[in-house]
Image (cartoon, grey):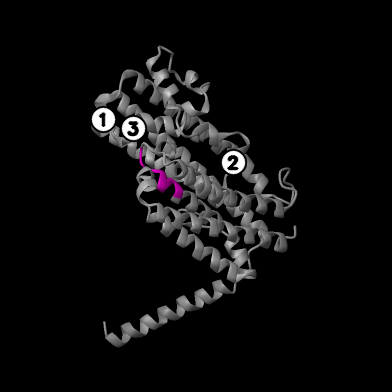
Amino acid sequence: MNKKILLALYFIFILIVSCKKEKEDNDDPVTSAEVLDDFANILAKPNYSDIQEKAGLLMTAIDSLHTNTNSINLINAQIAWRAVRVPWEQAEGYLFGPAEDNSYDPATDTWPVNTTELDSLLASSNALTLADIEVLQYSLKGYHPIEYVLFGVGGSRVAAELTVRHLQYVVSLSQSLFNATSALVTEWDSFSVQLATAGSGSTRYATQKNAFLTIVGAMQKICNEVANNKMQKPLDHLDSSLVESQYAHNATTDFTNNIVGIENAYFGRYNSVYGRSIHNLVADKKSSLDHDIKAQITSTIASLDAIDPNYGYAIFNQQGQILTAQQNINALFDLLRQLENFIHANITN
């Protein structure tokens, strides 16, 4: 084709895209009701469904390990464990509703693991069926006891070390985790209606403002937990046994996904699907705050990326990088306090 024609077609394409962008920029501002609806249906429900799906894949991988206990199946189960941690830790960026009301968080994600009692249980003759697992204390079920069995102390587990008791226990643990994530999905399906109808029929949120304050409060809470609890406690004591996800050396990844969860909550997105969001409301009325929040999220994630995935190593060897990340998280917390003030000033229903 003639170069002049190609050039003309290129400029026509640019003009079309520019016109489309201008139309999008001039669209009517989103409403607070639309934001809450999309938060429930584009972010929260798909996120929780993803946790359930990946918990099911973990259960299947562990069943395969039980049937054929070899290094390949152990690696596959370890990969599946890491995979389910991603959506779970992201969902902690807005931990409210059924996950908080009905104790799904402590029931599945209590840490550190009580290894003394766990090893005692494995050494006993106690039955390890699903029914037996369901009545155990929180520190003996959920993600981290599964992690302990699959990865071992120092992440050095080999398949030959797994006993019949290990395998019975981890099979039942994975079934219990899948059941919990399935129940959480069902409960969020109902709860999402309460969020989406805030201020217009919801029995949970009499006003939209209350719903938004709940969301922003949860974003603030995970900032504080990551910077001043998850990161700080092992650092205070220089004790790697206090590190979350210590056996898989997955703590820093967990921290990062917590901040990604905040980002998801701000943008009303899950994976590559975006809804109408808090970001849209802020950008429309206070663009400087929107700019600062977006920039701080980016800086915070970058500072966490600078820390070794093995946080038990980092507390001894990367204290400067840890401090920088904590400062970034706390700066993000301060901006989320400004976002809370924005909600008070601009959400009138």
Task: Tell me the residue that label 3 is attached to.
Answer: 153
Q: Residue at x 57, y 56 (%)?
A: 333
* On-image quarter of the N terminus: bottom left
Q: Residue at x 32, y 18 (%)?
A: 164
Distance of label 3 from label 2 (alpha carbons): 38 Å
| Mark 1 surroundings within 10 Å by alpha-carbon count, few (fewer than 14), some (14 through 19), many (20 or more) | some
Residue 35 at x, y percent in the picture:
62, 57
Please state which of residues 110 and 184 is positioned toward the viewer in this rendering: 110
* On-image quarter of the C terminus: bottom right
Q: Nearer the viewer, mark 3 or mark 2?
A: 3
Please state which of residues 237 and 108 is positioned toward the viewer in this rendering: 237
Vertical relation: 143 (above or below) 43: above
Residues under numbered marks 3 and 1 in contact, where contact means CB atoms less than 8 Å apart: no
Left or right, residue 309 beside residue 49: left
Residues under numbered marks 3 and 2 in contact, where contact means CB atoms less than 8 Å apart: no
Q: Main secondary structure of the magenta part?
A: helix
Disc marking residue 189 = 2
Distance of label 1 from label 2 (alpha carbons): 40 Å
Q: Amino acid at mark 2?
A: Asp
Asked if residue 28 can be seen in this view, the reply is no
Q: Residues in magenta? A: 248-255
Vertical relation: 5 (above or below) 57: below
Q: Residue at x 50, y 30 (%)?
A: 179
